[in-house]
Image: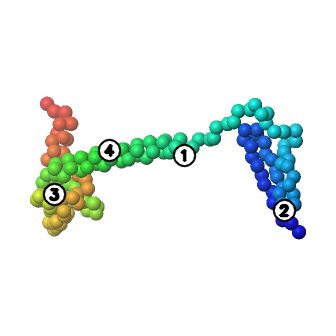
Amino acid sequence: MTATHLTLLLLPSAGLALAQAGGAADTAPAQPLVPGAGTPPASAPATAPGPGMGTLLFPMLVVVGFMLVMSVVTQRKERRRRQALMSSLKKGEKVQTIAGIIGTIAELRDDEVVLRVDEVSNTRIRFARSAIASVVRASAEPAAEAQARSEPARV
């Protein structure tokens, strides 16, 4: 008993698919699967191979480069915003820490901030200056001034 295998040949230039049965004793020529389709004419030009890896690699590198540039730009913006926040902290401002604790700045030092978190018991907590996430609202004095400006003067 001889083993036979079936090979499928695709010829993109002619648009043909040929099946070839092969075995130890079988040396039959390839048969076209599509009836009426023969071999391509001898004068048909050979087609160039499809797009190579270089054609696909360039757009991918451009996209990765764009993402890297945008990431760096975003990090710079965030660093500037954070630095402006740290330098603009003042005593009396209400801030929120990265842990979610909200308090009023009681003392400012070079690398520390003391927050008053409870007005009644005068509870104070000391944090690293970098632990301040955002200013919740400015001190009460500027808020009172803004409210006074928004109300019309009564005569």
Q: In terms of sequence position, does the residue under pointer 1 or pointer 3 come before the other?
A: 1
Name the mark on residue 73.
4
Q: Which mark is residue 53?
A: 1
Sequence-wise, the earlier of marks 4 and 2 is: 2
* Label 4, label 2: how far apart the Cα atoms are: 67 Å
Tag 3: amino acid: Ile
Q: Position of residue 62 (x, y in %)?
A: 44, 42
Residue 121: percent from the left, percent from the top? 16, 68
Asked whether 13 or 44 is in front, the reply is 44
Q: Which residue is mark 2?
A: 24
Labels 1, 4: front one: 1
What residue is rendered at 32% in x and 44% in y? 73
The residue singled out by tag 3 in the image is: 105
Question: CA separation, marks 1 and 2?
Answer: 39 Å
Q: Residue at x 84, y 39 (%)?
A: 37
CA–CA distance in space, label 3 to label 2: 91 Å
User: Pointers 1 and 3 in contact (CB under 8 A)?
Assistant: no
Tell me the element at label 1.
Answer: helix
Q: Quadrant for the C terminus, please.
A: top left
Tell us which disc is closer to us: 1 or 2: 2
Between marks 4 and 2 in the image, the one whose residue lies nearer the viewer: 2
Of tags 3 and 2, which is closer to the observer? 2
> In the image shown, does 79 or 92 lie closer to the viewer?
79
Q: Position of residue 14 (x, y in %)?
A: 76, 38
* Amino acid at pointer 4: Val
Q: CA distance from mark 1 to mark 4?
A: 30 Å
Query: Relative to 144, is 24 on the left or the right?
Result: right
